[in-house]
Image (cartoon, grey):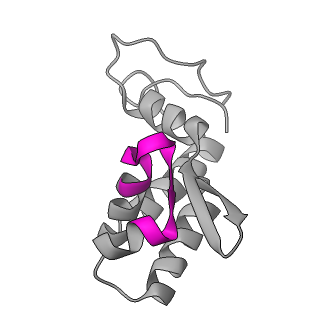
Amino acid sequence: MQRCSPLVREPLCVEDAGEVSSVFKALADPIRLRLFSLIASHAGGEACVCDISPAVDVAQPTISHHLKVLKAAGLVASERRASWVYYRVVPEALATLTAVLSPVDQPTGTPCAS
């Protein structure tokens, strides 16, 4: 997805509106938002499932499902190390969300092609 102008400057193009809405949909669930926040704020910018599981009061299969949704939305990337999976936030996903939600007076990316 290309970086778009803020919503307050011009409407999103159809393609980007679909992509951005899928990211918002993934973050709209409180458990996924909490997991995303735990990963983003973890020391070193990545977190093992073993680090974030105790902070969320759901079963391990449920955590795995929510992490899969975040990964499918392009918000997190993962890497298996031995028997654990480590997750990190995808910086480009945050940059896109920031650009779309930023006030007009802040610098942004290029506008979407209509």
Instruction: From the top left corner, tell me how far across and down residue 90 is, in percent.
Output: 59, 44
Q: Is residue 27 above or below residue 2?
A: below
Q: Residue furthest front?
A: 82
Magenta: main secondary structure equals helix
Q: Is residue 36 rendered to the left or right of residue 105? A: right
Measuring 42% from the left and 44% from the top, which residue is drawn there? 43
Residue 35 falls in which quadrant of the image?
bottom left
Q: Is residue 50 magenta?
A: yes
User: Can residue 75 be seen in this snapshot?
Assistant: no
Q: Is residue 7 above or below residue 106?
A: below
Q: Is residue 88 magenta?
A: no
Measuring 53% from the left and 69% from the top, which residue is drawn there? 67
Q: What stretch is highlighted in magenta?
A: 38-51
Measuring 56% from the left and 37% from the top, which residue is drawn there? 91
Instruction: From the top left corner, tell me how far across and down residue 24 is, in percent.
Output: 43, 55
Residue 53 falls in which quadrant of the image?
bottom left
Q: Which of 84 and 14 is in front in this view?
A: 84
Q: Which of 11 and 83 is in front in this view?
A: 83
Instruction: From the top left corner, tell me how far across and down residue 80 is, in percent.
Output: 70, 66
Instruction: From the top left corner, tell me how far across and down residue 28 is, in percent.
Output: 35, 63
| Quadrant (top left/top right/bottom left/bottom right) for the N terminus | top right
User: Can residue 69 be seen in this snapshot?
Assistant: yes
Q: Which of 70 and 48 is in front in this view?
A: 48
Measuring 59% from the left and 21% from the top, which residue is drawn there? 111
Q: Is residue 72 above or below residue 101?
A: below
| Quadrant (top left/top right/bottom left/bottom right) for the C terminus | top right
